[in-house]
Image: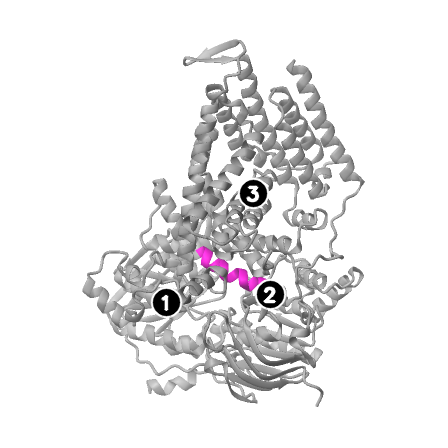
């Protein structure tokens, strides 16, 4: 690690996890029962929502681990809140976070543009799908159906998490709240250079 | 006896639950997850005190999810050969698909019950303290999550305030999911901006009280692992092993 | 005189993002047992100075320090992280964001664990500090369930459990109402006398501290030391004399309004009227139903009874909760009800022209409030309810709020202002609506209320010190 994490960054990641946790619960978590009956495919298109926090935090903090940590913290907090999915969520969080992290690591934490963020969203989708394939037994499903699920999830990751994460990061930057974080500094540095 | 699962070390419980879930992933016969599910239910009935009414309520969406799994696997099951045992709506179902479908359905039920067992018998604060003391997750992360947990009611209240204020300005309840996503952004920006400020304040308050993130040797309220945890872990593993063996025997 | 515990020699400080210094050429010493106030307007670097003393800065912001800071005779940068916090403890301003554990006891133990106090000593030290601070009954209380004033006392106990030499307080009263604030100061006064601690307080409202301080340092623009002299008690913020703008035309008429949520009655039926141009203050203890009334009046909460109004708007304590767009211009135009000329006129009157293209979240707090009021007026809501706009505001900001309300009331806007600050109320209000335990005690003429200390006391309010001072304006 080039720079150690500051406590305020860890706490930021944690609070982001809480904010997203609450908003998922209140604003997005609709039609649960309906989705349950439709089966596993009902959630595929909105999988990206769970990866946004990784991408948003990485866009702001720009340090190795900035995608993995918030996703993990968010998962631990969800478990603390009493999320019924329980401890399984922590492992899921770690794996999704690693998927997003992989994309940023592959570009050596130098680029934080839309393309990399979409790649990170897709990365999180791929990792989470491989894990899901194993744990949820997708092997028992028809390969073309599995392919459809996979495509939906990757698209959701790239579009909802990648584009959505970038959109949120830009929106938040414009509010002036991110003074003192890497995202503000590079913008200024870029302007001066 | 009825407090055993509540008093179990949370990290040990966490590891056992995780290991059980990963093990289940290797079985596609219907009996293993069914037996395991029944085993966990029996443990929960005898070794915990929980609000079964609430439990049933929380189990409901999972049960529906399991039903979703059942028909998805029947309709979109992999072509694995085997004898056709029946058909409906023009879709033929083989005995293997039938077995797989029930296996995945019971797997969902077993996972859900296991998750609820954890959620209903674990104190969240003790869980994080135990993650730090037993599984050695760094204090910065442990206390970072603790701060997030403390902020939960504050942020929930803030979300309410924001929703009320925005409704006053004519933002109605969005119906379409597209509107919902745009509406979510409007909710998120003020919340996240507030979270950035609160995060810095909370972090400063912790550091001003000497928190450096170094590992600590002594705790005011240590979380221990004792013989009870080994016994309980042993029981869990026996239930797991018995379900695996029983499933393989019954499956043949 | 004993050796200085803090000594600064020509210290300057700059944030890496800023071209200008936040603190410039500071030289001073603080001696054991002193009670020092650091005052100055918002943004003068007071808190930054405090953060240099407890070593939160420069590390946390990568700031650039020049000059020599010595703490207990040793150069500040020679302390290991966390080391100085045994000797210098801090209480912050926001009661809601300085705790990380659930109960008071756990929170105290958190400090002790950080300082590596042996476990065998912890119980004794927790008991001692709770006894000393009079909080023994709260040992097992859930922190989030305590009131703001109680939380600030717990925060102080968490600082004192480290047995420090210096206690720093960063605007500890900012989020407390005046009565709670006064009680906190008196409590702290007793504590300091008992322990002989050095106390350094960053504060912009010194009037609330009465005679607490022995010394006052004043910082000015660029973080320069303007004055460093023995402290004298400060009068409260003064507001210019104001003539009532109240007309005879009613703008709000409430009959038998009551609120019931989840089967619980939050407000018993109440009736009152307000006129165009009237400024009415709503006051009462915490949890008495002030915000419930505000939310019922503007239609956020369902209610029984009738509310006839020319249009009721609401400005929450955090005005940004209302914002929906990316520019002040769009924010004003959002409802689509006002013509472009009206919007131009509104922006001019509210002094929003210079920031019209700015992001509404990024402007100052005072400007946010103007934007929020502009949005309400553009939405044809000439009755405006403001929820605790005085909380955490410095003198300049309070005066700005005063003139904002005064000018709008001249234009016929009706204001209902929820506040605990009776100094402010005495300056601005035509009438005072008192609420207690979900019931309206009554709506009084402002001049009449200040004459009744018993009535104010029953509603947990401090009578304004300036009440007599303002009388000549009416003579």
Camera-side mark, 2 or 1: 2
Q: Residue at point 31% right, 57% down?
A: C307
The residue under label 3 is A93
Chain containing mark 1: C
Q: CA distance from mark 2 to mark 1?
A: 28 Å
Dot 1 and dot 3 within a common chain: no
Dot 3, crowdedness within 10 Å: few (<14), some or many (≥20)?
many
The residue that appears at 26% across and 62% down in the rendered structure is: C378
Chain on which label 2 sits: B
Horizontal and vertical percent position of residue C73: 70, 81
Report the mark closest to the observer, 1 or 3. 3
Left or right? Give the position of B39 relative to C412: right
For marks 3 and 2, give the CA distance: 28 Å
Q: Which residues are magenta?
A: B191-204
Numbered tag placed on residue C369 in the rendering: 1
- The secondary structure type at the circle numbered 3 is helix
Cα separation, mark 1 vs mark 3, equals 40 Å
The circle drawn on residue A138 is none
Per the rendering, the mark at residue B205 is: 2
Residue C247 in magenta stretch: no
Residue C267 occupies quadrant: bottom left
| Position above or below: A178 against C348 | above
Q: Is residue A47 above or below residue C412?
A: above
In percent of width and height, residue A169 lies at 43, 54
Please name whichever residue, C132 or C198, is drawn nearer the observer in this view of the structure: C198
Instruction: Read off the chain for label 3.
Output: A
């Amino acid at each position: 690690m080039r720079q150690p994490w500051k406590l305020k960054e860890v706490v930021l990641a944690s609070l982001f996890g809480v904010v997203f946790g609450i908003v998922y619960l209140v604003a997005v978590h609709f039609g649960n029962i309906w989705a349950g009956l439709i089966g596993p495919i009902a959630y595929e298109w909105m999988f990206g929502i769970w990866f946004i926090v990784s991408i948003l935090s990485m866009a702001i903090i720009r340090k190795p681990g900035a995608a993995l940590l918030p996703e993990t913290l968010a998962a631990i907090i969800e478990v603390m809140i009493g999320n019924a999915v329980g401890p399984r969520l922590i492992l899921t969080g770690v794996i999704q976070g690693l998927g997003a992290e992989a994309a940023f690591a592959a570009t050596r934490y130098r680029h934080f543009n839309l393309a990399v963020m979409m790649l990170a969203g897709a990365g999180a989708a791929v990792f989470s799908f491989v894990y899901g394939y194993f744990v949820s037994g997708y092997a028992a499903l028809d390969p073309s159906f599995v392919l459809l699920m996979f495509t939906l999830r990757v698209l959701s990751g790239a579009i909802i998490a990648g584009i959505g994460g970038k959109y949120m990061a830009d929106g938040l930057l414009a509010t002036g709240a991110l003074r003192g974080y890497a995202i503000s500094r590079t913008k200024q540095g870029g302007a001066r250079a | 006896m009825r407090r055993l699962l509540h008093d179990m070390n949370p990290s040990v419980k966490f590891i056992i639950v995780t290991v059980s879930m990963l093990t289940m992933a290797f079985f596609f016969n219907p009996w293993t997850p069914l037996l395991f599910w029944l085993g966990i239910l029996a443990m929960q009935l005898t070794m915990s005190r929980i609000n079964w009414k609430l439990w049933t309520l929380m189990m409901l969406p999972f049960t529906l999810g399991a039903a979703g799994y059942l028909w998805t696997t029947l309709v979109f099951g992999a072509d694995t050969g085997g004898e056709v045992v029946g058909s409906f709506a023009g879709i033929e179902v083989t005995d293997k698909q039938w077995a797989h479908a029930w296996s995945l359905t019971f797997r969902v039920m077993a996972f859900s019950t296991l998750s609820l067992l954890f959620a209903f018998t674990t104190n969240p604060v003790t869980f994080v303290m135990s993650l730090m003391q037993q599984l050695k997750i760094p204090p910065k992360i442990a206390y970072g999550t603790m701060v997030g947990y403390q902020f939960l009611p504050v942020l929930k209240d803030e979300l309410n305030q924001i929703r009320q204020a925005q409704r006053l300005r004519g933002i109605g309840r969005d119906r379409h999911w597209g509107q919902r996503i745009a509406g979510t952004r409007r909710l998120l920006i003020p919340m996240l901006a507030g979270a950035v400020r609160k995060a810095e304040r909370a972090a400063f308050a912790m550091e001003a009280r000497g928190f450096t993130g170094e590992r600590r040797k002594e705790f005011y309220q240590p979380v221990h692992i004792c013989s009870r945890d080994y016994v309980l872990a042993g029981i869990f593993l026996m239930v797991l092993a018995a379900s695996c063996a029983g499933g393989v025997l019954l499956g043949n | 005189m004993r050796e200085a515990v803090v000594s600064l020699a020509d210290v300057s400080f700059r944030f890496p993002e800023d071209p200008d210094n936040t603190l410039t050429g500071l030289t001073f010493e603080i001696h054991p047992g002193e009670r020092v106030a650091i005052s100055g307007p918002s943004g003068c670097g007071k808190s930054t100075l405090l953060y240099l003393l407890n070593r939160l800065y420069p590390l946390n912001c990568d700031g650039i320090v020049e000059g020599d800071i010595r703490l207990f005779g040793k150069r500040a940068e020679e302390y290991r992280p966390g080391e100085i916090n045994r000797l210098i403890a801090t209480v912050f301003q926001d009661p809601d964001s300085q705790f990380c554990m659930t109960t008071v006891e756990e929170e105290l133990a958190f400090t002790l664990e950080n300082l590596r106090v042996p476990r065998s000593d912890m119980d004794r030290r927790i008991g001692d500090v709770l006894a000393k601070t009079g909080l023994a009954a709260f040992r097992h209380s859930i922190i989030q369930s305590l009131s703001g004033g109680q939380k600030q006392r717990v925060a102080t106990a968490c600082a004192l459990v480290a047995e420090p030499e210096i206690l720093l307080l960063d605007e500890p009263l900012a989020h407390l109402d005046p009565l709670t604030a006064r009680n906190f100061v008196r409590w702290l006064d007793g504590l300091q006398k008992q322990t002989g601690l050095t106390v350094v307080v960053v504060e912009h409202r010194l009037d609330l501290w009465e005679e607490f301080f022995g010394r006052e340092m004043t910082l000015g623009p660029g973080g320069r030391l303007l004055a460093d002299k023995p402290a004298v008690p400060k009068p409260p913020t003064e507001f210019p004399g104001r003539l009532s703008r109240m007309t005879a035309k009613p703008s709000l008429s409430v009959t038998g309004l009551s609120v019931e949520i989840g089967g619980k009655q939050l407000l018993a039926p109440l009736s009152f009227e307000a006129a165009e141009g009237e400024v009415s203050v709503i006051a009462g203890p915490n949890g008495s139903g002030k915000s419930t009334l505000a939310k019922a009046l503007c239609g956020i909460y369902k209610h029984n009874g009738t509310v006839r109004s020319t249009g009721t708007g609401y400005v929450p304590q955090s005005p940004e909760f209302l914002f929906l767009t990316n520019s002040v211009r769009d924010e004003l135009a959002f409802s689509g009800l006002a013509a472009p000329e009206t919007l131009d006129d509104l922006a001019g009157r509210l002094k929003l022209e210079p920031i019209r293209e700015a992001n509404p979240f990024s402007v100052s707090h005072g400007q946010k409030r103007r934007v929020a009021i502009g949005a309400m007026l553009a939405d044809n809501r000439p009755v405006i309810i403001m929820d605790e706009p005085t909380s955490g505001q410095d003198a300049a900001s309070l005066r700005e709020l005063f003139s904002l309300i005064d000018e709008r009331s001249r234009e016929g806007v009706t204001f209902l202002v929820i506040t605990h600050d009776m100094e402010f109320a005495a300056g601005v209000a035509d009438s005072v609506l008192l609420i207690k335990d979900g019931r309206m005690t009554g709506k009084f003429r402002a001049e009449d209320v200040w004459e009744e200390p018993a009535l104010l006391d029953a509603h947990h309010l401090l009578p304004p010190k300036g009440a007599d001072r303002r009388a000549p304006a009416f003579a």
